[in-house]
Amino acid sequence: MNRIILTILMLLGSLNIFASTPDVEQAKDSLEIVKELTPWPWEEPVTPILEEYMAAEFDQYSGMAKSHYMVEELLMHKWGQSITEFIVLAELLYTFQPEDYQEQYRPEFDAAIADLNLFRLAINELLLPHVPGYKLKQQILTKRFDGEGMVIAVFDLFDPTRLQEQREQYPNIEAEVAFGDPITFLHGNTVIDIILDIAPKATIVPVSAESKTYNDAMAYMRNRDDISVINMSRAFHITNDQLDPEFAEHLSAILQSKIFTKSLGNTGTDLEHNNTDVRERLELPPLGSFFTYDLDLIRAFLAQNEGQAGAENLFFAINLQPFSNEISLTATVPGYNPLAIKQSFAIAGDAVYSASSQNFESGSSFAAPQLAAVSLLLLEMADYYGLSRVEAAQLVSKSLKDNARRSWLGDHNTGLGFVDAHRAMSTILRANSK
């Protein structure tokens, strides 16, 4: 967490922005300017945030109670994203205006946008000390291991400008390996932030692909012998409404010697498309996510590979709410699929700070890289004892699974349960002391 705070200060300093107490009045004035100049045609999410901040009773709480109030009651970790989404849409609407209009009011518009961003940064800085850190029992592991000499591929989508900034700060990030013409997206940059926060000296290989080049990317990662972990926060590959057979063959081969971590999804259902317990309890309808097709692909791959060598090296991440006391409202869970249960871990990914977006991100996409980073450090430990790549992957997989801490929420919601990196580390130590 200290490294996250340092990163924020570095970023703010590089932009000559110094967040302070959120200036609500300035934000209100700037919001009205933006709405007038776009012109904004709908209700917007920023006014309710300003009102909620003004009505908040921060002084009535202290310690952990204040953290729960800010995160669970006010949901402040979602405010920054809402403001960012408003700004992005406002900037788009502004470009629809005549060119002479845009030129005339550009200084006023840009200043108002900058003020809203200042308010967003100040809110996030205020919240940061109250958001739980990673709950992986990884503290002792990260004191002894840092990922140096280990290679992890991030199969995702990236913003190239931000990726270059990350590479300037971390020389252990390789140049992006792109197949075809994948879209630009900040998502993968945040995944890299998370991995390096846990394993700061790991070598990162950013790999991106468009749909028609998915298998080219998989073949590349399969054939790079130095890669020991692959993190994928994307859907499995689909062809003719079924799991792509070439993709499945690549993944099966990868699992022979590498650990592959994947986000289980953000559909609000189990793998059979049934609403989750928490959504049922709150009488919330299904999310209707576009990526529900991935659930069928996951089930298909698990069934095809049941009992096959290496199948145990596929890990899924289930997204929990910030304090790990409930699954996320958007989480995909294993349900009563026994194959998925024994491959899944429950990890808080609903309020993870990203230096790339300068916001708190939410989703199983940001739970999976936590699992990937811990797996990499345990593989580094196994490598220290001279285990082969295949032996190391098997030992780390078994150690993490055997030592997962069960959750009262049930294995249909949380799979094997919570990651316990310390106990997994102890298991590896015992295995190599004989």
Image (cartoon, grey):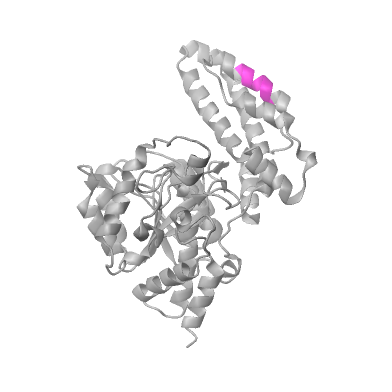
As drawn, is 29 to the left or to the right of 419?
right
As drawn, is 41 to the left or to the right of 344?
right
Q: Residue furthest right?
A: 59
Q: Which residue is drawn at 57% across and 72% down?
A: 144
State which region is magenta: 27-33
Q: Where is residue 288 in the image (x, y as percent from the top left)?
A: 39, 35
Say above or below: 357 vs 103: below
Q: Is residue 37 magenta?
A: no
Q: Which residue lies furthest to the bottom in this view?
A: 434
Q: Where is residue 198 in the image (x, y as percent from the top left)?
A: 54, 60
- Residue 395 shows up from this direction: yes
| Quadrant (top left, top right, bottom left, bottom right) of the N terminus | bottom right
Say above or below: 26 vs 145: above
Q: Residue at x 27, y 53 (%)?
A: 300
- Main secondary structure found in the magenta portion: helix
Judge by depth and name the residue closer to the eye, 21 or 431: 431
Q: Where is residue 298 in the image (x, y as percent from the top left)?
A: 32, 52
Q: How many marks?
A: 0
As drawn, is 59 to the left or to the right of 416?
right
Say above or below: 91 vs 296: above
Judge by depth and name the residue closer to the eye, 26 or 50: 50
Q: Residue at x 35, y 41 (%)?
A: 292
Say above or below: 344 vs 24: below
Q: Position of residue 82 (x, y in %)?
A: 56, 32
Q: Does the magenta stretch include residue 28?
A: yes
- Residue 125 shows up from this direction: no
